Amino acid sequence: MKNRTLVILALFILLSTFLAAAPAFPKELKVVTINVWSGLDYEGTLKMGEYESKEVRRGRYNLLVKELRLLNPDVVAINEANLLPRYARRLAKDLDMDRIHAVGLGGIHFGYIGIPVNFREGDAILAKKELKLKSLGRKRLSGGGIINNFMTFHLTDACQIIGGVIEFNGKDVYIFNTHTHASPPNEPWFMERLEGARAEGRLTDKGLRIAKKSVVEDQKWRMDEIKKLLKWVSEVVPRGRPVVLVGDFNAEIDTVEMRQVTDAGFIDTYTAANQNLKGYTWNPETNLNIIKYYDEKGARTLSEAKGASPKKIADKLDDFIQKRLDFIFVSESIGAESVVESAVVLDREEGGQHPSDHYGVMSVINIE
């Protein structure tokens, strides 16, 4: 009996030693998403207008890198990266991460050569090197012409979703990043704002009808994009596998278009962790880049009589509304209970500027 007890004790010690020596998989995945802001006004043929000088833009980029290093995320997703691939390559090097990217907008370009000369924008996913990030490709959601990493030939807005897969906690985790069409919300309260612009004489009766129609049509545009991206994700990912879907959706969580995402089973990590907190990622009241470069006073005086289009007037009205447009969603296979924390990040100013005109979102997710 004594010998048997000694054998069991020895086996227990050996097993404990083996388990202690075995590599432990991390369980908490930290994800950050941010629209890094191209700094362009999207007007111009040969060259688009730029809000900042090169020195100011460089300072903003350095602040972004500094803040991301402090956050130390496992995965970073960015939108409006310009110029690609240079921007994504530089950021990945500065953060010591792997990256995948896809050009989403570029006018007429063959590589870096083309017009507008300062426009080759898109989206990227970065991940720590030990996560062995691999590309799943990209899916065009809207826009005509030709758009890929080698050449672009298009004259209208276009949007996309890109996908990657990482190895985390001994399993494949699928990461998707998107940037959908930007436009004002098709909500009664915004239509009232347009009515107010008409009462102030900034819109004619015809202009009011045009502005309202553009809001409705643009919402349909975004709804179709979200429908397509959800379909593509479902086709790419094997059933039941963990999915993290992030990006700048240009719509708030309670809108009709975003309801498609939650109805598909995706969980908004920020809401799961913070309940009733708003968490604005577009904040014209506090973001110094919006305050400095987006002319609220000028926007209030825009009128058809001075040559502004009804759509531009509607867009400018929307620019000065606080919103949460950037999201980190997880699939049902991960679950709301796995969200450890979520917060608005990259919202600290330094030297009179923020890293972007958007704030970012960070979520820590327990992937068992």
Image: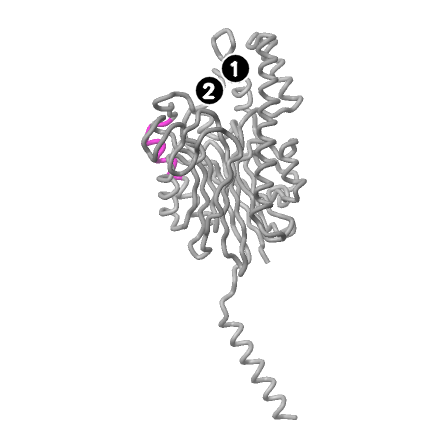
Residue 24: percent from the left, percent from the top? 51, 65
Write the residue at 58% across / 30% down: 222
Task: From the image, tell me which residue sits under label 2.
Answer: 295
95 lies left or right of 73: left
Look at the image and say whether residue 225 sits in the magenta stretch.
no
Q: Residue at x 64, y 17 (%)?
A: 192
> SS at mark 1?
helix
Q: Is residue 198 above or below residue 235?
A: above
Point out residue 86 in the picture as x, y percentages from the top left corner: 35, 39
Write the residue at 44% across / 29% down: 289
Instruction: Please tell me which of labels 2 and 1 falls first in the chain.
Output: 2
Question: Residue 61: which quarter of the image?
Answer: top left
Most foreground residue, 212 or 156: 156
Tell me where residue 10 sits by quadrant.
Answer: bottom right
On screen, 203 above or below 148? above
Determine the image quadrant of residue 352: top left
Label 1: which residue? 300
Give the residues in magenta.
52-63
Q: Is residue 56 on the magenta stretch? A: yes
Helix, strand or loop under label 2: loop
Amino acid type for the residue under numbered disc 2: Asp
